[in-house]
Amino acid sequence: MSLPAPHEVVERALAAAQGERCVVIVEESSQSEVRFANNTTTTNGRRRDRRVVVVRFCDVAGGIAAGVASRSGDVDVTQMLEAATADARSSPPSPDAAPLVEGGADAGFDDAPAVGDLQAFAPILDGLAGAFDGARSSDRVLAGFVEHHTDTVYLGSTTGLRRRHSQPTGAVHMVARSTDGTRSAWVADATGDFSTVDVGAMDARLSARLEWAKRTVALPEGRYEVVLPPEAVADLMVDLTNYAGGQDAEEGRTVFSAPGGGTRIGERLSELPFHLYGDPAEPGLECAPFLTVGASSSEASVFDNGMPIGATSWLEEGRLANLRYHRAAAERSGARFAPPVDNLVLELGGAKGTTEDLVARTDRGLLLTCLWYIREVDPSTLLLTGLTRDGVYLVEGGEITGAVNNFRFNESPVDLLSRTIEVGSSVRSLGREFGEWVNRSRMPPLRVADFNMSSISAAS
Amino acid sequence: MAATELDPFEMPAGLAESVLDRARRAGCDHAELRVERIRSQAVALRDGEVETAADDTESGIGLRVLHDGSIGFAATVAHDAGAAVDLVDEALQVARVASRATGRRVELAAENPHGEVEWTSPHRTDPVLVPLSEKVSMLGDWSARVLDAAGIDHVSVSVLAVTEDKCYADLAGTVARQRRVRVHPRLEAVALGDGGDFETMRTLAPPVGRGWEYLEGDGWDWESELARLPGLLRDKLSSPSVTAGRYDLVIAPTNLWLTIHESIGHATELDRALGYEAAYAGTSFATPDRLGRLAYGSAALNVTGDRTAAHGLATVAIDDEGVEGQTFDLIRDGTLVGYQLDRAIAAATGMGRSNGCAFADSALHIPIQRMANVSLAPAEDEGPTTDELIRGVTRGIYVEGDKSWSIDMQRYNFQFTGQRFFAIENGRLAGQLRDVAYQATTTEFWGSLVAVGGASTYLLGGAFNCGKGQPGQVAPVSHGCPSALVSDVRILNAKEESGR
């Protein structure tokens, strides 16, 4: 690929800034994917991407303003600096202004970006070929997606800071449907290392679930005790943190707003001492330990580029512990600087057991597979709506006794934590809805009382 | 090598020819090259202060090949001819690796070449080129006007402006250079009540395929909307909570476009109906065996797909497989009569020519079947006005503006909220209601379509961010519709749904 080395782009842009305050980010990405449906591969691709962001900070009347220019490919850093500078100079002072981050250079900052190898897909595709053969001979149809990308980010600042981080990300999704379309099941595996993926084992789990669904039971809408597998919990917790902005809460417009003003930080949301957190050093879920921000928002600031990201609790001992703030807002509010973290863990100290263990201890309830099309309905309660998908199973006397129709649910993940009856061990999990954006999560299965199934969905 | 700006309208001489020639010599049955540059500017103000100002240009070169029955795609952000030619080998490698698990050969429906095509979506002022200071000034003025009104506590205002330049070239001989321009301005106000109570209200203006002139009043009456919004929001905050039950609904196009999008637009994508999105976006209840027979709705339901509507967000001259933009029927007199197609699906099903619904959201993504502008036709002749539709309702709710949306993976069960809900009592509006959500099953809902409004009520709604595919792609799409009267729809109270 005929592009200059990423670290050289950073240095060239910083040199062009001629000592004026500037931050440069280069995000290099190598991505490959294979998609399949109807027992055959469909749209398959490979790409190399490079995004360059130049942030220029200028003194303006009343404060400091930031200008941002983003480009892809072989960029003209001088033109980008000119564009960012023009925007900064014509802007009013930035409300998120803060001192630029100081620091030294990471070892290996000059290293070339990591590149994924398409051949890593070969064993998975061979596994899929066998699974397709098996599916055709057993009246099943397989669909899914295999993706792998390697992302390397370089960040440099005129303060002397130089940071580099590289990480692989991958996922395998598989759906099996009966040929008549009446039964379906889904499994997924999130991993950056494809050597750990066992397509045959995933296919076997799908087959087992389709077997469960051979007996069907029609149930009406209503409130049910449910076992949420870690994948469903992941989506609900991701959405809970999506709406955990500190400024929004202070302005009185979220579930985390205190009725008399301010936020609910410190308030108990669950009697169970849940710990919900992100941590770049979390074993097996490692992610970028410093912040890169291409455009400011109410929760993240371009002034904070390069800030170290540490372990951040969102819930601690069942209490709301932090909301997201950039440094300037945190200082104004007397809150803790809490940037977004690219992983999410929910755990309960001492909790043990798998989804199957929770099912075994359920007298009568529903085992869900995953949740889909989740959207906010009421911000004051964080009421979410969505659907069950690819398998709802009736549990009677600790055993799965058949498949149930799908439902539309209306539930709040905040309220749901206070109705949790039992918690299992946290395991690596990939949400069906938000796993595309939050690949690194570790969640427990939950048994929850009175889950609100608002209506029946005829989808199968 | 010196950095160069990639301009799809001024490509290096011979770049496309050299790539396609190499693909031809490598034995590709089909190859298509897309060179794209997407410029965008996002500006957001929060309570009058600039929160976000980002200027972005995304550019690259993508190549899709069909070789020995397998699809391969490769893309790069490198701009030089050498990198572009290398894509042929990369795409072929992808096709070969994927062929290890290819169960059926891919074929593409025939499309006659269109030669050299150049097309620009209608606009006066390229919105990306409007200086940031001018954008901040206009949004600041809007923000101040609403924030200064009594009872308004917070205002967020933003605009996203996009100019998408694309050069498409394929082995058959079509070379299309197209520019599409679009803008999405929006303002949301927050009003706080007692004891932590609050309400929000957003402007109803849809995103459109127009230039900066849209914010200056060409195609939307911003003066009126900004003037009315504070009073409407204050009224909403003090309105009663809805009593759950069944109501007749008069739905304005500012809300109905999204219901059409979810329950008709996606349901009539044939790739979905055939299972090609089973792992992600989902399938469809409207399966091909029901074509020509499925009673989708009442006789008032007439829906077309098009890639030709003026200012439509999905409007093109040539799609991303070299197919000419067309208009086609999906539902006629309530019966399913057609699907949205790309070339692979058209060939696999024997449906003949693709109707031009292939799209990739950037050079780095492979084209997949994406939604045309899917629109509900207004009543013929003059048709009723919205007021006349309301006058025909004894007990109902009038709905304006979209907000929350969700539908199941086969497009049966949906639930929507909105920006404003007005009670209808004996043919008259009787104040706003809070906490309203409507929930239905697609064919039941459209089967209860009593009447559609006339052309005077027709509006093109839409979104920039329709999601589909893996890896995920977003597509801009518009949906035109008149106001409509739908009887006996289930209304939920959102507060009661949360158990409060």
Image: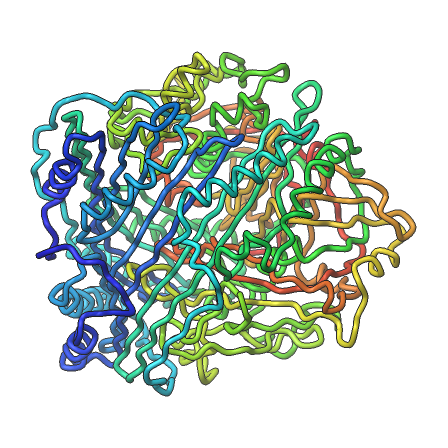
User: Is B458 or A214 nearer to us in this picture?
Assistant: B458
Q: Nearer the viewer, residue A451 or B189?
A: B189
The part of the image, by quadrant, that contains residue A418 is: top right
> Quick check: A5 above or below B65?
above
Horizontal side of residue A95 vs B310, given as left or right? left
Foreground: B309 or A174? B309
The quadrant in which residue B448 appears is: bottom right
In this view, B219 is above or below A431: below
The percent coordinates of residue B33 (x first, y second) are: 26, 71
Is A200 left or right of A117, judged from the image as shown?
right
Does residue A449 show up?
no
What is the basis of the colouring in this image?
A: rainbow
- Residue that extends furthest to the right in the rendered view of this protein: B426
Report the side of B457 relative to B220 (left or right). right
Residue in the foreground of this view, choosing between A429 and A326: A326
- Which image quadrant: the N terminus of chain B? bottom left
- The x, y position of residue A317, in whole percent, is 45, 13
Give the x, y percent position of residue B427: 89, 53
For the C terminus of chain B, give its image quadrant.
top right
Q: Residue at x 42, y 51 (%)?
A: B130
Q: Count the numbered circles shown.
A: 0
Which residue is located at x 12 percent, y 53 percent?
A: A3
Residue A28 seen by the camera: yes
Q: Quadrant of residue B232?
A: top right
Residue A342, percent from left and from top: 32, 33
Residue at position x 76%, y 52% from top?
A: B489
* A239 is higher (above) or lower (below) than B114: above
| B383 sits left or right of B335 in the view | right
Rendered residue at 21%/74% (across/down): B16
Q: Most extreme residue toward the front, as rendered? A: A61
